[in-house]
């Protein structure tokens, strides 16, 4: 493995790991705050236990996200010094603001965890809301920084120099809203389905059914909001890509030839060498409509661009297809849930219905990782789109592969620790979180 590949692999692994915790941090606090609100308005002690259980989960995942996020910050400077040398002064604002949001989130989590019976009940609840809002803000700010890499703005690039820097314009670049909107919606779908599926599994096992049913209903509600908004946010993001990065759109669809009334491709195997896609289902004119709102609009093909500017077409295309597939599946599950919730209440307790959510536990995160693959790999060979190539930004220091191996070991270790802690949280439900369980004893110091 050469140093360039090692550096890219390390960033890919770090981002792939961190993005999961970023999404949890953006969404789980809202589930926690909603459960807390239900407790305050109904006085149902089960909601109180659920709020405490979820808050401990938020704390565990927040700590892990802080570790992985800090590692990423160092990696940007260590692996891509040329990039940070020029880009730092331009898009540093969203990173600094993200740091502020992070500290607010950390303080609010502390207040919430230790504020039971110490604060006014509504101020305590408000602290939980602040955790959610600051986590969501933090995620959006990081995505705004990434969006700048896809849509550079806020400076003039003259003779290899970055002049007339405007950090505000850089932060609010053309891509920040489409990417942030799509990311936020995806985070709600991914986290909602993962949490709902875990509680559905506990219901199927007939463990603390009332507790897990309440948790399932709340998390499934959030999941459905994300799943049904995903096509809208995806459409906004796709239209933005078509306008700013036509070569990325062409790679997503393995669209080699420029044409009017371009077909939307489903499946298929891209043959980059022969510049064609095989075994694909093509829906006439749909790509033109989705990209430009006009069935006869012209969509540029890959052949219109220099080959050394092409991203890895197969990787981008397959990732896009995976994202679309799981996004559609979650949307269908969302429709089933709405039907069950409003017209077929008996479905909510059926095994097939609950199993559907159990199977869907990883779907949101698979779609999320695939979507980020499209975003990052589809931008290649550029680290700053159209201005700086990724290979020109990598560190000249040797031995990066050893750093990659070390960081991989760290992330695997963190994953195992998190799995252990979350499984322990689930096992503790009957003992310290569900007041209706005969084994409930929240004062047991051994727990």
Image (cartoon, helix red, strand yellow):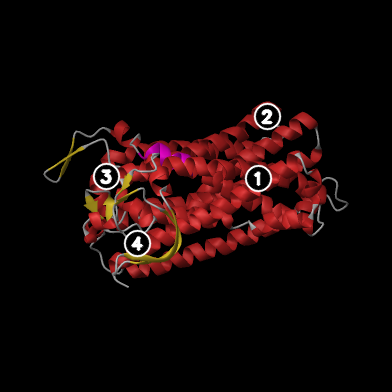
Residue 133, how many percent across, how many down?
54, 34
Per the model, the C-alpha gap separating discs 4 and 1 is: 33 Å
The residue shown at (80%, 39%) is 45
- Which-is-in-front pick, marks 3 and 4? 4
Per the model, the C-alpha gap separating discs 3 and 1 is: 43 Å
Q: Are marks 4 and 1 in contact (CB under 8 Å)?
A: no
What secondary structure is found at the residue carrying circle 1? Answer: helix
Per the model, the C-alpha gap separating discs 4 and 2 is: 55 Å
Q: Name the side, left or right, on which 210 lies relative to 199.
A: right
Judged from this view, the residue extending furthest toward the left is 159
- Which-is-in-front pick, marks 2 and 3? 3
Q: Are marks 3 and 1 in contact (CB under 8 Å)?
A: no
Q: Name the side, left or right, on which 402 lies relative to 131.
A: left
Q: Give the range drawn in magenta.
A: 175-182
Q: In which quarter of the image is residue 115?
A: top right
Per the model, the C-alpha gap separating discs 2 and 1 is: 40 Å
Label 2 or label 3, whichever comes before in sequence order = 3
- Which-is-in-front pick, marks 3 and 1? 1
Q: Name the side, left or right, on which 45 lies relative to 106.
A: right
Residue bearing mark 1: 335
Q: Residues within 10 Å of mark 2 (few under 14, many from 20)?
A: some
- Which-is-in-front pick, marks 4 and 2? 4
Residue bearing mark 3: 87
Label 3 or label 4, whichever comes before in sequence order = 3
Q: Does the magenta stretch include residue 25?
A: no
Per the model, the C-alpha gap separating discs 3 and 4 is: 27 Å
Label 4 or label 2, whichever comes before in sequence order = 2
What secondary structure is found at the residue carrying circle 4? Answer: helix
What secondary structure is found at the residue carrying circle 3? Answer: helix
What secondary structure is found at the residue carrying circle 2? Answer: loop
């Amino acid at each position: 493995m050469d140093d360039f590949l090692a550096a890219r692999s390390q960033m890919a692994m770090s981002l792939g790991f961190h993005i999961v915790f970023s999404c949890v941090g953006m969404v789980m606090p809202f589930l926690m705050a909603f459960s807390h609100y239900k407790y305050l308005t109904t006085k149902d002690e089960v909601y109180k236990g659920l709020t405490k259980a979820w808050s401990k989960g938020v704390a565990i995942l927040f700590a892990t996200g802080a570790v992985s996020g800090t590692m990423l910050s160092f990696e940007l400077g260590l692996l891509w010094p040329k990039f940070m040398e020029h880009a730092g002064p331009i898009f540093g604002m969203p990173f600094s603001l993200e740091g502020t949001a992070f500290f607010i989130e950390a303080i609010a989590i502390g207040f919430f965890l230790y504020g039971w019976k110490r604060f006014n009940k509504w101020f305590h609840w408000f602290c939980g809301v602040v955790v959610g809002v600051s986590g969501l803000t933090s995620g959006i700010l990081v995505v705004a920084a990434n969006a700048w890499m896809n849509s550079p703005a806020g400076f003039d690039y003259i003779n290899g120099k970055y002049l007339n820097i405007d950090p505000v314009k850089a932060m609010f670049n053309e891509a920040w809203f489409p990417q942030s909107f799509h990311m936020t919606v995806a985070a709600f779908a991914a986290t909602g389905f993962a949490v709902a599926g875990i509680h559905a599994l506990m219901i199927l096992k007939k463990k603390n059914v009332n507790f897990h049913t309440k948790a399932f209903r709340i998390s499934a509600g959030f999941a459905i909001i994300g799943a049904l908004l995903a096509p809208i946010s995806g459409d906004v993001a796709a239209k933005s890509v078509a306008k700013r990065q036509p070569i990325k759109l062409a790679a997503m669809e393995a669209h080699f030839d420029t044409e009017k009334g371009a077909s939307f491709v489903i499946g298929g195997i891209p043959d980059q060498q022969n510049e064609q896609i095989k075994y694909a289902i093509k829906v006439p004119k749909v790509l033109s409509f989705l990209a430009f709102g006009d069935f006869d609009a012209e969509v540029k093909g890959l052949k219109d661009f220099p080959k050394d500017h092409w991203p890895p077409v197969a990787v981008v295309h397959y990732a896009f297809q995976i994202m679309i597939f799981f996004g559609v599946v979650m949307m269908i599950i969302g429709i089933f849930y709405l039907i069950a919730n409003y017209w077929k209440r008996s479905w909510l307790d059926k095994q097939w219905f609950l199993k559907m959510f159990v199977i869907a536990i990883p779907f949101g995160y698979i779609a999320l990782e695939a979507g980020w693959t499209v975003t990052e790999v589809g931008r290649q060979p550029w680290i700053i789109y159209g201005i700086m190539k990724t290979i020109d930004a990598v560190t000249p220091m040797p031995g990066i592969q050893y750093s990659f191996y070390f960081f991989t070991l760290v992330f695997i270790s963190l994953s195992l620790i998190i799995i252990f802690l979350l499984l322990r949280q689930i096992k503790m439900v009957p003992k310290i979180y569900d007041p209706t369980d005969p084994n409930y004893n929240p004062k047991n110091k051994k727990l």
